[in-house]
Amino acid sequence: MVDPIDSRRLAPRKPVPWFAIRPMLGILLRQLYLYRRSLPRWMEIFYWPLLDLLVWGFLTLYLKQGTIHMAGTAKALLGGLLLWDMLYRSQQGISVVFLEEIWSRNLYNMMVAPVTPFHVVFGAMLTGLVKVSLSSSVAIVLAWFLFSYSIFNLGLSLIPFILALVLMGWSLGIMTTALILRFGQEAEVLAWGVIFLFQPVSAVFNPVSVLPGGFRQVAFLVPASHVFEGMRGVLSGKGFPWHDLIWAFLIDIIYFLGALLLFHRVLERARKTGFSLKLGS
Amino acid sequence: MNEGDGLVARNLVKRFSKDRPSAVDNISLSVSRGEVLSIVGPNGAGKSTLIQMLLGLLVPDSGTIHLFGEDVTRHRRRIAHRINYASTDLSLPYSLTVRENLDVFALVYDLPNPRRAVTRILETFSLGDLARIRVGKLSTGQIARLGIAKALLSSPEVLFLDEPTATLDPEAAQEIRVLLQGHVRNSGLGLVYTSHNMREVERLSDRILLIESGRMVAEGTADELCRKFESSDLESVFLKSMSEARESQGITASDQKGSVCG
């Protein structure tokens, strides 16, 4: 048994000074403890500078070629930006739906409900589609008013381009969600960052031909690279990009099936190992 | 009890790791319509694991669970609409109002007339005045009441409640108990219930299952358990039964840090 506290020994403490070091070290220590056990958090520190360097480095290589037509390139850059945003929003649409449920400690309520996890996934896809439609409509209208740029210059090919990108976004969203369910809150950073891993090899702002050898092979396996190559082709007057679109959709289907399989596996594993009620806390 | 009549679980075993003892070790239980079964045990005794298995969200290593004759582990989809669950560990989105939250779940539960079902449950749980209030503005007791209302919205035949009154003051806890007793009596709801509040367990339960370290220690009505452990109330039964169980398993009180008995 511990002795009762002798109140006479408790000398009153002074207020914490404005520039006391220990409280600041406490804040630092809290973060170090967090990072000590979290590979995703460490990756994030190096991830963004590296990806920014690659994206802008490849664009610089493209511009340095000196053979490009500036007006056409400017159009391709804006078109690339608008289409990239659709890919990004559709991925986020899915991931954020699940994160919202985790943050509000509501995900388990959904798991208990008499629905299959795929009702939830397809509900999230629907949500993503609504978000993409809203955000892209605003961006397209603003691009027209502010920069006199119309994405409808892409003609009929615009529709399959958008579909291919949304499908890739959904696939990445489902994969990210599966990883969050598997690894918990640590993997949340993936929801915001995983899409940018694909940006340097998606040829958003520069053609695939600018990429170094190894990157070119990887780019071939990314549906978005075929979409953006097709977009540049249409803008330079090459006609409907059948070849690019077929490849984009073929790879998209593989991504989508892979994502659903991963999601199914994660849930099956959770049924064996237990699903944390406190996920997100 | 017949497997087609309610919930019947036999010889459930669940072990998460080879170098740790089983979280649930050979537990059998049954609950019929209109019956309240309380599962009582110290923290870490295996109550939540057991409930996850009964809900069909966790596969047992061995043993069977049947609900109204259906194998819960293999065919959860066939019976998921007949059960529901609420726990103080869960919440509902704070930024939505009470009504909005219930509207969402009425759709998720695929209820044929969602608006009418929500209005009825709001009335039953005296939540009508709070319908337009955001969940984040509710008191803990009101959130607990909403959680149970959400779980009863789908008119389940068996309801699982994991410590539903754990964070409530005595008055709010009493309100919840009265609501639950009314539902069990009027609708024939089967209730599986965990709580650390022994007086509550005594008042609410038809039968009580005492578990410790994943094993069943005793089962019976409050009176039967009091007689068996020669105690005057359920709290004494709990302390005595847990102590006996640990002695028989060779565990000392100091090995059980964090448990309520010591």
Image: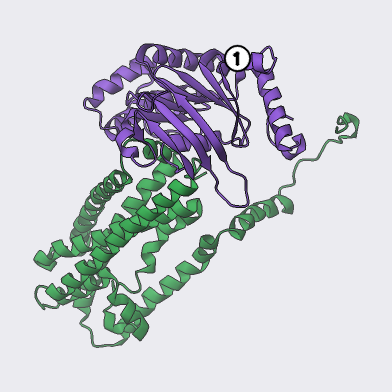
Image coordinates of residue A31 in percent, x first then y, are 61, 55
Residue that badge 1 annotates: B224
Chain bearing tag 1 is B
Q: Is residue A160 left or right of residue A130?
A: left
Residue A218 to residue B98: above or below: below
Q: Secondary structure at mark 1?
A: helix
Q: Is residue A210 left or right of residue B50?
A: left
Q: Quadrant of residue A80?
A: bottom left
In the figure, what tint was chain B given? purple
The residue lying at 61 percent from left, 19 percent from top is B198
Q: Count neighbours of disc 1 (C-alpha within 10 A) and say few if under 14, some if 14 to 19, many if 20 or more.
A: some
Q: Nearer the viewer, residue A52 or A220?
A: A220
Image coordinates of residue B4 in percent, x first then y, are 35, 26
Q: Quadrant of the N terminus of chain A?
A: top right
Specify whether residue B133 is in view: no
Q: Nearer the viewer, residue B224 or A221?
A: B224
